Amino acid sequence: MKRRIAVLLALLVTWACYGLVILEMAAREAARCHEFGDLIAECFSPFFRIFGSISVVFLLSTIALAFFGLQLPSNPDKD
């Protein structure tokens, strides 16, 4: 049971930090791109590519951590 709680806590902390970083990056990028007007899509394009790449890495890491962390131990006495 402790193992599952630790995994869920790690996932929660990881995604909270991820969210804070992405929100800060998005706010800075919005402030920087605000002056471009009609070219705003071109300004945000690199940010969305980086955001997408980081999101995929975090999603795959979350799936891997959840899979390995929530598996039943081979020896139930050592939980």
Image (tube, rainbow, N blue to C red):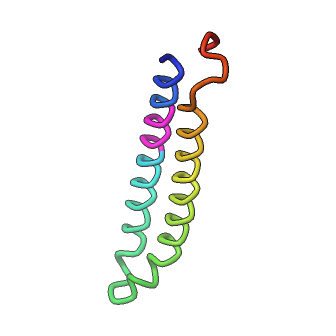
Q: x, y percentage for residue 32?
A: 42, 70
User: Which image quarter holds the C terminus?
Assistant: top right
Look at the picture and state if 66 lies above or below 30: above
Tell me which corner region of the image, top left, top right, bottom left or bottom right, holds residue 28: bottom left
Q: Is residue 73 above or below residue 69?
A: above
Confirm whether the magenta stretch covers residue 12.
yes
Q: Is residue 28 left or right of residue 50?
A: left
Q: Please state if 22 lies on the left or on the right of 76 as rendered.
A: left
Q: Position of residue 23 (x, y in %)?
A: 39, 54
Give the image location of residue 35, x and y in percent: 36, 79
Give the image location of residue 50, x and y in percent: 55, 67
Q: Is residue 28 above or below residue 3?
A: below
Out of 48 and 8, give the one closest to the viewer.
8
- Per the rendered image, the range of residues in magenta is 10-17
Identify the residue shown where x is 58% and y is 56%.
57
Magenta stretch prevailing secondary structure: helix
Residue at left offset 47%, top offset 49%: 21
